Amino acid sequence: MTKRGLVTDANIAEVLHKNITVLNLNECDVSDIALYKIAAMCPHLKKLDVNACKANRTDVTDAGVCEIAAKCRFLQVVFLRRCVSVTDASVVALAEACPHLRELNIKNCTQITDVALQILGQKSGQLCSVDFSYSQVTDQGIFSLVSGACGQRLKEIHMAGCLHITDDAVEAVVMSCPLISILLIHGCPKLTERSRIALEEVLGARSRMKQVTWTVY
């Protein structure tokens, strides 16, 4: 049902039970109402995908995500792409309540700021993949993230379309994240030749690099 997009706020309780560990709702029309039911009925949930596949989601908000964080403490993977009502408060809740968080997608959550990355750096020591593309994040947020608890574990960072980041942020990632293998930085207009040089150096030194994207301006 979830793959066919048939699950809604009205019927989701019919498919939920306490042993569910993975929920993929990216094709379903759901809101905070569904998240409240998930939080109440799925205490062992490890993966929640509410990425918006088409139009932005506006009815998944901090209230629903914070309830999920409080009740589903085994969460490892959370996908919230294009949930445009989500703010730093959701990330703070997840980082503080879900110590096993490994993957977080908040791409196109345009209200996300450095506060989100600061708390991830402080609390999310297991984080290995994060996508905050097209957010308000600046160099300071990235410094906090990569110098924090997860810096040595991060393998994948997507920060495409972050208009405020500079070469300093790219260099910080390259220097602080020895396991980095995927780095997406296209659409960042403040990046210059310095970033290209830093990336070429790491590409030459680390055979583990799988994907790097950037835009030449």
Image (cartoon, grey):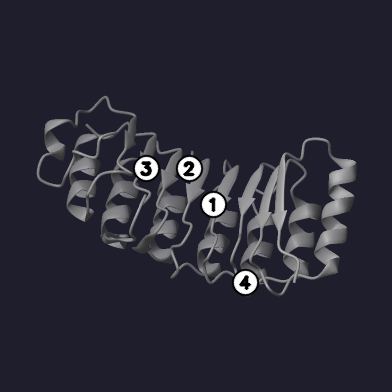
Residue flagged by tag 2: what amino acid is it?
Pro
Q: Which residue is mark 1?
A: 123
Q: Which residue is mark 4?
A: 138
Name the spot of residue 179 as percent of width and height, x first: 74, 40
Q: Which residue is mark 3?
A: 49
Q: Residues within 10 Å of mark 3 (few under 14, many from 20)?
A: some
- Which of label 4 and label 1 is nearer to you? 4
35 or 50, nearer to the observer: 50
- Which of label 2 and label 3 is nearer to you? 3
21 or 134, nearer to the observer: 134
Q: CA distance from mark 1 to mark 2?
A: 7 Å
Q: Which residue is mark 2?
A: 99
Q: Secondary structure at mark 2?
A: loop
Q: How many marks?
A: 4
Tell me which numbered mark, 1 or 3, is placed earlier along the sequence: 3
Q: CA distance from mark 2 to mark 4?
A: 25 Å
